[in-house]
Image (tube, rainbow, N blue to C red):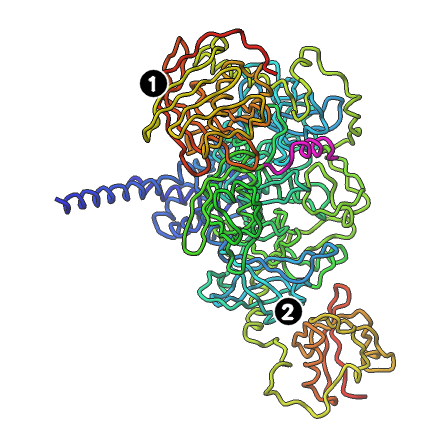
Amino acid sequence: MKLALYRVRFFLAVWSCFAGASAYSLADDAPASANAPEASESAETPAAADAQEASDPAESSQPPKSAVAPEATNPTANAASVPEPVLEFERQRIAAVAKAMQPTVSVFAAGGGGGGSGVVISPDGYALTNFHVVKPAGNFMKASLPDGNLYDAVLVGLDPTGDVALIKLFGRDDFPTAEMADSDHVRVGDWCFAIGNPFLLATDFQPTVSYGIVSGVHRYQYPAGTLLEYADCIQTDAAINPGNSGGPLFDAQGRLIGINGRGSFEKRGRVNVGVGYAISINQIKNFLGYLRSGRIVDHATLGATVSSDEEGRVVVTNILPTSDANRRGLEYGDEIVAFGGREINTVNGFKNVLGIYPKGWRVPLTYRRGDELHDIWVRLAGVHRQEELIQKTIGAPIEEPLPQPKEAPKKEGEEQPGDDGDGEERPKIQPPIPGQDPLPKRMNPHAAPPPPKELAKYHVEREGYANYYFNQLNRDRVWSAFTSASGDFSTAAGPWELEGTLAGGGPFAARLAQDGARGVFPRGEVRLELDRDLGEQLVPAESGGLLVALHLWRRLLVEGPSQYGDVYYLGTAPMPGGQGMADVLVAVYDVVESWFYFHPDSGQLVYMEMFADTHADPCEIYFDEYHAIEGRQLPHRFDVRHGDAQFAVINLNVAKTPQGAAPAGEN
Amino acid sequence: MKLQADLKVFSMRLLLGALLVAAALIQPAVAGPSLADAIGNVQPKMVKVYGAGGFQQLEAYQSGFLISAEGHVLTVWSYVLDTDYITITLDDGRKFQAEVIGADPRLEIAVLKIDARDLPHFNLNDAAEADVGDRVLAFSNLYGVATGDEPASVQKGIVSAKTELAARRGAFETPYTGPVYVVDAMTNNPGAAGGALTNRQGRLLALLGKELRNELSSTWLNYAVPVQELAAATDDILAGKVRPRGDDENLRRPADPLTLTLLGITAVPPVLPKTPPFIDAVRSESTAGRAGLQPDDLILFVNNRIVSSLEALENELALLDRDDSVRLTVQRGQQLIDVTLGARE
């Protein structure tokens, strides 16, 4: 009964707010209004009418349509009668904006020209922004927070295809951070708001808030060439203007759901037309580990093209024979049913999934051939060759989001907020943007003032990297976590003697040493000659090169990343079989690239993949059952896989890792 | 024993159900309902229309919505429909070839038909009205953002004004001069025309208008035509009253029919399957010349029947005797002009 009464009052409140929408400026966006049809029904019942009179005499005598009038004439007169749920919603919104404001960054390029927005995501100052904001700004920039401080920031990582950049602010270890939402739960019609630095207005360090709704989810917006692809993005009518680029889009609770970076500006000059796009935060979560690696990271391709057929099925129209998808069984003409855990009905839907994963990840795919469904896990290849990506990243002339439009004509309708509007339809003279002084053209980055001395050490130039400093940082972090979990193997440089049995029966033995490797398997003995190409000694047969993998495993453990060869931090990638994320070190030796997966919590090495050939399946080893051997933790179970088959499970009985001569470079 | 277990499960379910209901009742007051439900009701009624265009900033797409369960679609009358190959994609992703069954250029609307059944639709006779200050939602496929089964884009706004487009004459050139809702949502975008304006509950209010740009200030007017202005014309179209009769085999055809040449009109050459009937030249010493028709006039109606192509125009004239008088409605710039050409003088 109480509940019923409450409902009546609630609907009442709703009704008066609905009917008098224009009267309550505070009631703007009141959640209650959505219930108005029900409200109008209850208002017709006598009880409701009474209650209405009690709560708002001004309205009770008015028919619904004209209820607006008496209040509209004096908006403040009825302030006291603003329904509590409306006030409550308003309080929530104010609180959400206040909370979301704190970590919102206004980015200004060093040298005084250009900039954009960003958002801090960790207390030690990591912040997200757009690639197209950072690109003209260079390696060092200034970033302000609403706390009134201007912080120095350095570039950390770049994702040019996804238009994302990671930067790091310095000066605090307790930066306010944005709480990330699960953007897959964002629905069309949800209230949302953007905070940022439109037209670089935040010269007083106070960012701008614009409110709107989610207009569309899982939108696909084509890339310019291969860069700046907005896959699976969130569309909003919250005003997104030049300078909002890189800034956060929040849900009604003030949780981060995306990074704004694009709009449709066609025909209307270069300002908001109610069609903005934000990169979903879930996509960025996938890339975050990669971005922390300081690398220029790549997006993924399946190695196959798809299109819709006449029945609306998405089918494979072309597939590279060298692709992992093909090796896993996908062929021309197969229908893609599901990808990345999503049902696929359109090509855009397929591209949306492809666009949210980094190169190298494994993603589940379901295809139909005839009447049969096949579930496979596919390793995604890169969109670019490494040199190509670097070239495009450096070379692509991407305009900074300067609010001053230029006159150069442009053909594409979809543009970055930093781009020009459409040349043909745009009037010759742009109406001035209120309150906006023309900013000077960005200076040549080489002419920008040198970075502060104390910051210079946080940027290390190296080809292929946005900032090699952060790669070293993470490589050392992962390695030091591993050595504290496993012990120091650099003093175990003698020949390793391993003995055990295969799960299916039969003996196993291996001797892994500086100068060669030898293995005994049920089918016989195999050897590795280190003066020959390792990629051509993939023994034993059908293992994909287990002996090479074991040899390189020992090599990494004994030599460490600094002596091994080229070892870099890849970022985080999922463990096969959905066992969560791992920190990955990529180690290149000879022609062989090995990926070592370290458990993010324990630091322990849990998995490795040894690629003798980029177009062939790797030899995979799952390391398990770690026990102490001579004071160091050594796995005693090796699950070895190659392609779709399990090669062997090795259970170790004896392991000797003697001290040897101090390791010296082998080459 | 099994039965007992089932009963237990059942009562658990009941309890759970009750809890859910209670939660649903309380929820609005706590978290506030979203617009998602209203939007979810409208989306299945929205369609994507594809046709002519695709060059010179003429997008080959626009928006529309279903107005009958049998696949009638209301949209704007535009160059996009100047083709025999109009495709409509429903919200569920199904694609259909569509036929223009009628149009009213004065209101800038057209009704299309696809071959489908049991479709969710708006009822034009049950449309809502809005006042200034009311909250509205705009649904459209602006910029062609959505394809296949991807839902139309949604924007929120309020009604800023209810006015007549005629009041803006001179600033905005448009054949339609009747009442419109002006909204603060940015609806006047490429591809948005033909979309739906609804209230917060998802009840239809108006049809999003065609792109309308102020030549002087280069601003665009976000407006929508109230359904009440369109309902009668739409009914006429559905009743076949404005349909060209030319294709009807049963009609009596005069022995000496009227022709363009007799009127003194030379039309543009029929270069397209559906060439719009533009006048290329007018003989000065002719009925057309004396009535003031000019080159570049677009003939829209013959005796109030729409002629959407040169072929349709010729077919319609073929039903008239050369001794009859004929009423032509032409579009000159953004103006509609009626002329009556008397019988042979």
Locate the N terminus of chain A and report the quarter of the image it occupies: top left
Q: Which residue is mark 2?
A: B84
Give the structural element (helix, strand or loop) at label 1: strand
Quarter residue A97 falls in: top right
Q: What residue is rendered at 59% in x and 87% in y?
A: B250
Q: Is residue B344 above or below residue A100?
A: below
Q: Is residue A194 above or below residue A517?
A: below
Type of amino acid under label 2: Asp
Using the image as rendered, state which of residue A226 and residue B248 is in the foreground: A226
Quarter residue A74 falls in: top right
Q: Is residue A149 left or right of residue A582?
A: right
Give the residues in magenta: A382-397
Q: Main secondary structure of the magenta part?
A: helix
Spatial CA span between label 2 and label 1: 78 Å
Q: What residue is rendered at 79% in x and 51% in y?
A: B216
Using the image as rendered, state which of residue B278 and residue B301 is in the foreground: B278
Return the residue found at the far front. A524
Q: Is residue A396 covered in magenta?
A: yes
The chain identifier of the residue carrying mark 1 reads A
Query: Which percent across, then down, holds residue A27?
Result: 51, 39
Q: Is residue B188 left or right of residue A86?
A: right
The mark found on residue A653 in the picture is 1
Return the residue found at the far right. B284
Q: What residue is rendered at 56% in x and 27% in y?
A: A592
